[in-house]
Image (cartoon, rainbow, N blue to C red):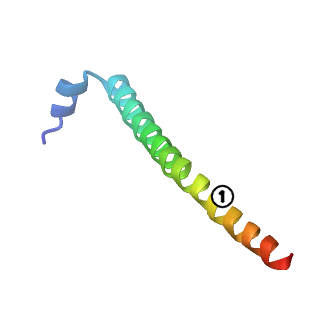
Amino acid sequence: MTKGAGKKIFGNKKGQTAVEYIITAAGLFTAIISFYVLYSYLVPQQFEEGAKVILSDYDASR
């Protein structure tokens, strides 16, 4: 890529910086949403398994 090719795409340095910030923000947003979806599935599942263990120990001790 030639030295002037970036200027043709972004126009100037401020435009390139804005595009970089938008891409970075979109990547972070995607990562946060992915973690939220993952943990919203895993946490309730862990609570259910923990509740089974607690209740089975409670029944065994009676």
Query: For this view, does 43 lie left or right of residue 26?
Result: right
Furthest-left residue in view?
1
Q: State whether residue 4 appears in this view.
A: no
> Could you tell me which residue is drawn at 48 percent across and 45 percent down?
37
Q: Amino acid at mark 1?
A: Phe
Q: Name the spot of residue 45 as percent of width and height, x first.
A: 57, 57
Q: Name the spot of residue 4 as percent of width and height, x first.
A: 17, 31
Q: Toward the viewer: 22 or 18?
A: 22
Furthest-front residue in view?
62
Query: For this view, does 28 lie left or right of residue 54?
Result: left
Q: Toward the viewer: 10 or 51?
A: 51
In which quadrant is the C terminus drawn?
A: bottom right
Task: Please give the residue where the numbered disc 1 appears in the rendered image.
Answer: 47
> Could you tell me which residue is drawn at 40 percent across and 41 percent down?
27
Furthest-bottom residue in view?
60
Query: For this view, does 23 lie left or right of residue 46?
Result: left
Q: Name the spot of residue 42 as percent of width and height, x first.
A: 54, 56
Q: Name the spot of residue 49 as percent of width and height, x first.
A: 63, 65
In which quadrant is the N terminus drawn?
A: top left
Query: For this view, does 16 lie left or right of residue 6?
Result: right
